[in-house]
Structures are given as C-alpha cells and as structure tokens.
C-alpha cells in the first residue's frame, strides 16, 4: 500500500510546501485547487508508484499527463502539461497521496484559513512526529558526519562489495534524503551532497574490491546513471537560488567534494565529469572567488598529473565558463572525435543561454568531427543519442536566427542518423532533387513514397522525378516477377504522361522501344505492357 511506502512527515511537509505557492485569497489559486481536487475525487489519478520519495502518477484530464511529485523537495516536481508549477494535475496527485496519510479536508480548511503553522509543526512540537536526524544539519560538515554515520551502520552489516554497492543506492541514498535539513533553501544542495557521497561510496567499493565488469555494466551503470540524472535535476533547480547569501559558505565547502568525485576514481568518467561540470555550470558559476581557486587547483594538479584526462576536462570547463570557446574547441580537436560526447553539455548550455555569438566555433567543431565519431566502433544507440541532441540544438539555432545553413550542413554530415530531420527539411523547402537523391542513397523504393508526394513532384519538379522513374523501371524489371512487372508498367505510364506534358513524346517513344526490345523475351512483362495498353498505344 502507498501509505507503507512513504512517511507521514514527508507527505505533510510536501503538502504545506506546495500550497505555500497558492494564496487562499486569490481567486485563480482557489479555482486551481478546486480543479485539482475535482480530478482527485473523480478518480482520475492512476498508475501511482513511489521510488526514492518521488511519486509518479498519471492523471486523465482532457489529455492524459504524467506527474512526478518530489516529496522531499516539492519545487523539483514536474508535470508533462505546459502549465506553471504547481498545476492542477500536480495538486490532484498531492491530494491523492495526502489522503493516504491524513485528513485531506482538514488540511484544505487550514489552507483556506491561511494558518501559518501547519499540522507538521504542531505534531513535531507535540512529539508525535520525530525528525529524521537529531543532528543540526546546517553545515556541509554536519551533513557528512551524518553520511558517514549512516554508512558505517550499513556497511558493518554487509561483507560482499556487490551487497555494499546495491545497498548504497537502494538503502543509504533514500535514508540520507529522508534526513534532509528542514530549511528549504538548504535542501537542494544537501541532496546533491547525498548523491555525491553515495556515488563516492559505490566507486570506492569498486576500487577496493574485485567487482566483475559485467556487474559494472549491467547493474551498477544504472545506479550511477540514476544518481547522475537526479543530481543534474537538483542542480538545475538550485540554479534559481544560487544567489542566496545564506548558501555562500555551503557552496565554498562543496567544491572539494566535487573535485574528489572527478579525480579520486577511475570508472564512469563520463558520468563523473557530467556531474562535476553541471554543478559548476548551474550552481557555482557566479562564485568568482571559487572560480579563481579552481583555476589555481587545476594548474597545480596538471603539473603533478600532466596525463590526467580528468584534469584536462576540468581545465576545459574553466575555459568554457570564461567564454574562451575557440580555445576549448581547439583543445578538443587534439583528441579527434573522442571528446564529442564530453562536449555536448557545453554546447547545450550555449543554446540554453541563447548566446548565438558563441555558436560558430562549436558548429565548426561538430562539422569536422561528427563523421569520425559516427564511424567509431560504438553502440548505435550512443550515436543516435548524440546526433539527436545535436540536431535539436542546430534546429533551435536555425529557428531563432533564421539561418538554416548550419542545420543543413550538420544533417548532411550526420547521415544516416539525421535522415528524419534532413528528409523533412528538404520537403518543406521543396528541394526535390536533393530529396530524391537522399531517398536513393537510403535505398528507399519509389513505391514507398506517398502518392500525393509523387503527384506533387510530377507537377512541380518533373526533371527531378523522371530519372528516378527510369531507375525504378529497370529495378522492377530485374526482379523478374509478375508484381514487379505491374509496378514497372505503372511507372512507364507515368513517364509517358510526363514526357507528353513536357512535349517530348519523341524521347518517350525512343526510350520505350528500347525497353520493349531489351526485354522482349520476358513474356510476363510483355503481357503486362499489353494489359496496361502501352504496346497497343504504339
């Protein structure tokens, strides 16, 4: 049951946090709460699942939507609808969850009365609900005391490194999240540190014990990736609050732990660097004193470990933060195509900031190296992910600037993975000759084209369609079966109509006579020509 999977204090805290965004005296907010309540009471919340204090559910509105309700830090919740937080769907899921832990009616009545002290505070003062930790979790140092305390209790019970790794993600991480400080402004940064510590413990187990490569690839990768995604999600949320003066000392104390994750381990470099870079891009970027200290640390460490790829990546990240894009791509080029996946977050950040003036050197880098990357011995899914990401960025650039040349050039270099985008663009711009060439290269048969599209090209681009029809006739005849002969005759009839329209009937007659003569021994083909009244017409 849902009530067994979540704690009452989590639900009460989340409910109060969400409704703080809504005013009981604002008519629009009142209507929003009513709509959410109606969705809940009509039973339109379904497929409810809980994992690591995140409730995922579907809500059947005019169109179905997906909701993710974060019980630990409500502002990190999301909904697939386009409305701002909190939307009626999020409220519907909140009410569904709240009703499993406490009286929903009393909760809403308290909100309507505008009571500042919620039920959670009252129950806590009465000793009916205890905080997750007796520690005063207001500093990074205190957080790590708690982390180590929880880890020591867990690790003493387990011996196998596989058990330790599994339990770190499945037990330790959720436990640390539930012990988050009560100050809302501290929670996102605390969650990042909980993720950093959990990942550090898992990677340390790999370093200290022999763990099979199959386990790393099949099991541990999913844990590492999930932690990476969650820390990135939290970092994006924390970006909103990074100017808070109260966080300044916490941000300073965060830097060593981020460095340690990057440099103290060997496996999962891509994921580790992604976390390091995201925290700098989203959380620490405005702290100029920290940036200066990081440059000094990188310079010193690079002298001690000149071959360290981790330190090289950290150095490139500093250059990017300083806007030295030409230097970054020049250094990336020294590694050929190897660095393409590592570069994507930088490129994405440029477009996120709409810094179009920084676009050109990155475009040139990808045009130069994407072909080499796609020819590397890498899994197809990885190539597809990289191309899909890059194409989205190039599309946004084209849409925002009106310059589609970079998109077209990128699509050309990223084939066949960019086929869909390139295909649509050629059709939209009526570049039929290039479009037909693309189909030919991709091995798509003329018969697979939409009939309406063939008719459009017959009218608007006959010179592009005629050579394709010629090739299609020969291809179908070579297949030597009755169905293919019928297809060939259809193409011949279209060719005759087009030549006649172009007033080149003499060209048609010469061409047709050659076809008949070349294949006069194919009795079935000759029969289909007669059925199609092509021979009779002669």
Image: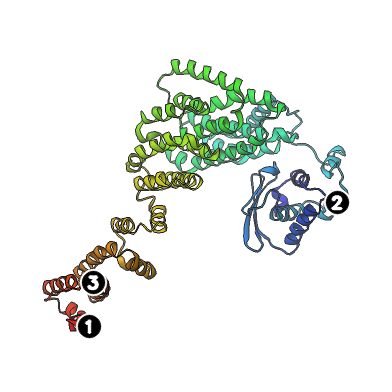
Compare residues 515 and 73 and report the one nearer the observer: 515
Q: Quadrant of the N terminus?
A: bottom right
Residue 500, horizontal then vertical, whole percent: 24, 74
Q: Which residue is mark 3?
A: 503
Cβ atoms under marks 2 and 1 closer than 8 Å:
no
The Cα atoms of the two marked residues, 3 and 1, are separated by 21 Å
> Could you tell me if residue 167 is visible in this image?
no
Q: Residue at x 31, y 58 (%)?
A: 433
Residue 100, horizontal then vertical, whole percent: 76, 54
Label 2 secondary element? helix
Mark 3 or 2, nearer chain start: 2
481 vs 82: above or below: below
Label 3 secondary element? loop
Q: Which mark is residue 112?
A: 2
Q: Is residue 503 shown left or right of residue 296?
A: left
Compare residues 63 and 28 and report the one nearer the observer: 28
Q: Quadrant of the C terminus?
A: bottom left
Task: Decide: few, some or many residues near mark 2? Use Cα within 10 Å; few <14, some 14-19, many ≥20.
Answer: few
443 vs 262: above or below: below
Compare residues 538 and 273 and report the one nearer the observer: 538
Q: Which mark is residue 533?
A: 1
């Amino acid at each position: 049951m849902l009530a067994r999977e979540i704690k009452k204090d989590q639900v009460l805290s989340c409910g109060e946090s969400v409704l703080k965004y809504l005013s009981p005296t604002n008519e629009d907010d009142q209507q929003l709460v009513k709509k959410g309540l109606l969705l809940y009471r009509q039973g339109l919340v379904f497929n409810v699942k809980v994992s690591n204090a995140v409730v995922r559910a579907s809500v059947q509105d005019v169109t179905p939507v997906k909701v993710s309700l974060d019980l630990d830090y409500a502002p990190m919740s999301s909904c697939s609808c386009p409305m701002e937080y909190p939307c009626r769907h999020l409220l519907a899921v909140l009410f569904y969850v709240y009703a499993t832990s406490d009286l929903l009616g009393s909760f809403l009545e308290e909100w309507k009365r505008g009571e500042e002290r919620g039920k959670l505070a009252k129950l806590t003062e009465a000793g009916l609900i205890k905080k997750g930790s007796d520690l005063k979790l207001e500093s990074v140092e205190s957080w790590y005391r708690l982390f180590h305390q929880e880890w020591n209790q867990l690790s003493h019970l387990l011996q196998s490194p596989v058990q330790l790794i599994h339990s770190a993600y499945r037990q330790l991480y959720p436990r640390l999240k539930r012990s988050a400080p009560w100050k809302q402004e501290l929670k996102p940064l605390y969650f990042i540190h909980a993720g950093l510590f959990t990942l550090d413990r898992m990677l340390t187990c790999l370093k200290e014990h022999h763990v099979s490569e199959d386990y790393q690839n099949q099991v541990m990768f999913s844990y590492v990736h999930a932690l990476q995604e969650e820390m990135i999600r939290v970092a994006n949320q924390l970006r909103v609050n990074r100017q808070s003066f109260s966080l300044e000392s916490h941000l300073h104390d965060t830097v060593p732990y981020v460095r340690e994750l990057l440099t103290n381990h060997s496996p999962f470099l891509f994921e580790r660097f992604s976390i390091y870079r995201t925290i700098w891009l989203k959380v620490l970027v405005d702290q100029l004193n920290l940036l200066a200290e990081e440059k000094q640390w990188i310079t010193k460490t690079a002298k001690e470990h000149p071959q360290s790829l981790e330190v090289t990546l950290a150095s490139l990240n500093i250059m990017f933060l300083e806007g030295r894009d030409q230097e970054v791509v020049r250094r990336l080029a020294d590694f050929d195509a190897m660095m393409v996946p590592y570069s994507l977050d930088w490129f994405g950040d440029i477009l996120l900031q709409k810094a179009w003036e920084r676009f050109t050197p990155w475009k040139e880098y990808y045009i130069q190296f994407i072909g080499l990357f796609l020819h590397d011995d890498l899994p197809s899914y990885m190539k597809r992910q990289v191309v899909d990401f890059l194409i989205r960025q190039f599309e946004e650039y084209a849409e925002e600037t009106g310059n589609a040349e970079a998109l077209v050039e990128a699509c050309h270099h990223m084939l066949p993975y960019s086929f869909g985008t390139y295909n649509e663009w050629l059709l939209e711009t009526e570049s039929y000759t290039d479009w037909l060439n693309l189909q030919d290269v991709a091995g798509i048969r003329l018969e697979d084209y939409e009939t309406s599209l063939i008719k459009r090209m017959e009218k608007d681009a006959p010179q592009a369609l005629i050579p394709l029809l010629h090739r299609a006739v020969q291809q179908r005849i070579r297949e030597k079966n009755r169905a293919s002969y019928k297809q060939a005759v259809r193409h011949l009839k279209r060719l005759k109509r087009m030549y006649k329209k172009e007033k080149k009937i003499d060209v048609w007659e010469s061409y047709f006579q050659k076809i008949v003569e070349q294949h006069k021994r194919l009795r079935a083909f000759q029969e289909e020509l007669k059925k199609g009244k092509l021979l009779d017409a002669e």
